[in-house]
Image (cartoon, rainbow, N blue to C red):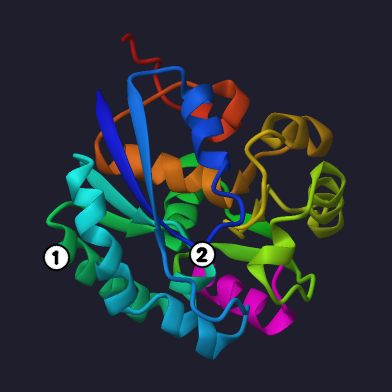
């Protein structure tokens, strides 16, 4: 059994995680600890407070008691908003507090893009435009080329959590461009786990979503490889693990 730990802000799309655990169909346990979201706002000042070392450290002890072998800060905007250097410092601080390997959803996207070997990316963000552009800048710092960015102007994670399949598909299709090699949906408040394979079939290219890459990143940190086609092309690049 491999135990993966996640710090998830508030309550929006946390049910993606037990769904992903089921789709992995392996000896993987996913443990989720909710952190204080503070002010629910996709606004730079609120996001900086949400991702502060103090708020993340508050959830670490509960996560350590689960036996987690690695921890991922399951929040994209609450990590990339710090910039490339600041996001590294955030993860280092989390690793020290937790006493285990650590990462964040923003780095999960950067590593997943490298895993797929894609470079030109289209971003379909729920965020306001200024926050979406910060994610594009983070990916550029990671060496990717952003072909298009579509923001949706949604302020709260609570509202994003109410979106269903129709809204998710509309966001992905509106963000996509002919020259983009992959489409990224960066909000962990967005329910996507049930739709990834269908999205890829619809768009004809890899789709990376926040909760999907977050779990993949935790597996990477624990050196686990699981083949799970229902979770998209990202989970078919790895050899099947016999359990």
Query: Tag 1, which secondary structure?
Result: helix
Q: Is residue 123 visible?
A: no
x, y percent for residue 12 = 61, 56
According to the image, label 1 marks what residue? 96
Q: CA distance from mark 2 to mark 1?
A: 20 Å
| The N terminus: image quadrant | top left
Find disc 2 in the rendering and name its residue: 76
| SS assignment at label 2 | loop
x and y percent of residue 125 in the render? 70, 65
- Left or right: 17, with 154 as reference point: left
Name the residue at 28% across, 77% down: 53
Residue 224 in sight: yes
Q: At 43% from the left edge and 84% from the top edge, which residue is drawn?
A: 49
Name the residue nearer the viewer: 66 or 173. 66
Q: Is residue 125 above or below residue 214?
A: below
Residue at 73% from the left image edge and 80% from the top image edge: 129
Q: Quadrant of the C terminus?
A: top left
Residue 133 among those drawn in magenta: yes
Residue 62: image x %, image y %?
A: 24, 53
- Graded by Cα atoms within 10 Å as few (under 14), some (14 to 19) or many (20 or more), the crowding at tag 2 reads many
**Crowding at mark 1 (Cα within 10 Å: few <14, some 14-19, many 20+):** few
For this rendering, which residue is in front, 191 or 221? 191
The secondary structure that dominates the magenta segment is helix
Q: Position of residue 76 (x, y in %)?
A: 51, 64
The stretch of residues the image draws in magenta is: 124-140
- Report the side of 74 relative to 189 (left or right): left
**Residue most toward the top?**
242
The stretch drawn in magenta includes residue 27: no
Based on the displayed image, in which of its 4 quarters is residue 205 positioned?
Answer: top right
Q: Earlier in the sequence, mark 2 or mark 1?
A: 2
Contact, CB < 8 Å: mark 2 with mark 1? Answer: no
């Amino acid at each position: 059994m491999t135990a993966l730990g996640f710090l998830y802000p508030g309550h929006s799309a946390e049910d993606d995680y037990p769904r992903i655990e089921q789709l992995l169909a392996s000896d993987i346990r996913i443990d989720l600890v909710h952190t204080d979201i503070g002010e629910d706002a996709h606004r730079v000042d609120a996001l900086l407070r949400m991702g502060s070392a103090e708020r993340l450290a508050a959830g670490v002890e509960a996560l350590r008691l689960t036996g987690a072998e690695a921890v991922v800060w399951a929040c994209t905007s609450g990590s990339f908003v710090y910039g490339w250097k600041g996001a590294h410092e955030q993860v280092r601080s989390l690793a020290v507090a937790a006493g285990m390997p650590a990462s964040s959803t923003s780095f999960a996207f950067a590593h997943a893009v490298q895993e797929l070997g894609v470079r030109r990316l289209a971003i379909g963000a729920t965020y306001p435009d200024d926050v979406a552009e910060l994610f594009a800048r983070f990916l550029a710092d990671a060496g990717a080329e952003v072909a298009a960015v579509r923001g949706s102007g949604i302020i709260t994670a609570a509202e994003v959590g109410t979106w269903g399949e129709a809204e998710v598909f509309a966001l992905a299709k509106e963000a996509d461009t002919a020259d983009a090699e992959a489409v990224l949906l960066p909000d962990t408040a967005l329910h996507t786990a049930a739709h990834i394979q269908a999205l890829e079939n619809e768009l004809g290219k890899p789709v990376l979503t926040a909760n999907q890459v977050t779990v993949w990143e935790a597996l990477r940190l624990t050196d686990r490889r699981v083949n799970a086609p229902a979770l998209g092309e990202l989970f078919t690049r790895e050899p099947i693990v016999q359990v």
